[in-house]
Image: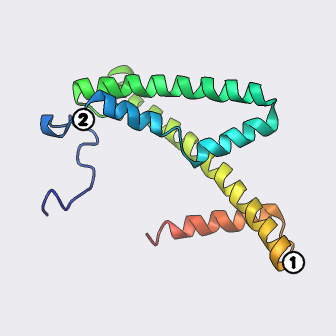
Amino acid sequence: MDKEKNKAEVNALTPIPENERKSWISMAFVQAGICVCVPAFLEGALLAEAMPVWQAIVSGTLGYVIVVIVMSILGMMGCDLGIPSCTLTKSTFGDKGGRYIVSLLFAINLTGWFGIQNGLCGEAFTNFMSQYVGIEIPVVASNIIWALLCYLLQYTA
C-alpha cells in the first residue's frame, strides 16, 4: 500500500525517521491543546460544583499547568531524540516496566474518563426521557444501558 494512503501508526516503538519529525514547539502546542476539550470543560463544571469558584479555578489551572509542563518536557525529549513518548519510559522503567506501567496508567485514566462520560450520558438520557417522553428511567439503569451499547458498538467500527 502507498505510504501516503496508509495513515496507520508505523513508528509506535521505533525511532521516528528524520524526515517525519516535528518541532518540539508544535508538539508542545498539541499537548497544551489537549487541555481544551470537552472533558476539560466537564472537569471545570465538576470542580465548580464541588468547591468555591476561585478555589476551583486555582486547582484546575494548577492541575493543567502541571500536566502541560510534564507533557511538554516529554514532547521535547521525544522530538530531540526522535523517540515516541511511550518508548522513553523504557529507559527509566525497563522494557517490561515501561510497557506495564504506561499501560496501567492509560487504563486507569481511560476507564475513569469513560465512567465520568458514561455517567453524564446516562444522567442526560434519564432527564431527557423524563422531561420530554414522560418515562422515568433510573440513572443506574441508563448508565448500564449506555455502557453496554458503547461496549457493543466498539466491535462494529
- Which secondary structure lies at badge 2? loop
Circle 2 crowding by C-alpha within 10 Å: few under 14, some 14–19, many from 20 = some
Position in image of residue 27 (x %, y %): 34, 34
Residue highlighted by disc 1: 134
Are the residues flagged by discs 2 and 1 in contact, CB closer than 8 Å?
Answer: no
Could you tell me how many numbered marks the image carries? 2
Label 1 amino acid? Gly
Circle 1 crowding by C-alpha within 10 Å: few under 14, some 14–19, many from 20 = few
- Residue sitting nearer the eye, 52 or 141: 52
Q: Quadrant of residue 131?
A: bottom right
Instruction: Determine the residue positioned at 66% across, 45% down.
Output: 42
Label 2 amino acid? Lys
Vertical side of 137 occupied by 111: above or below: above
**Lower sequence index among marks 2 and 1:** 2
Vertical side of 9 occupied by 123: above or below: below
Instruction: Determine the residue positioned at 52% across, 27% down.
Output: 67
Position in image of residue 95 (x %, y %): 33, 30
| Image quarter (top left, top right, bottom left or bottom right) of the C terminus | bottom left
- Which secondary structure lies at badge 1? loop
Position in image of residue 88 (x %, y %): 33, 27
Residue highlighted by disc 2: 22
Vertical side of 116 occupied by 57: above or below: above
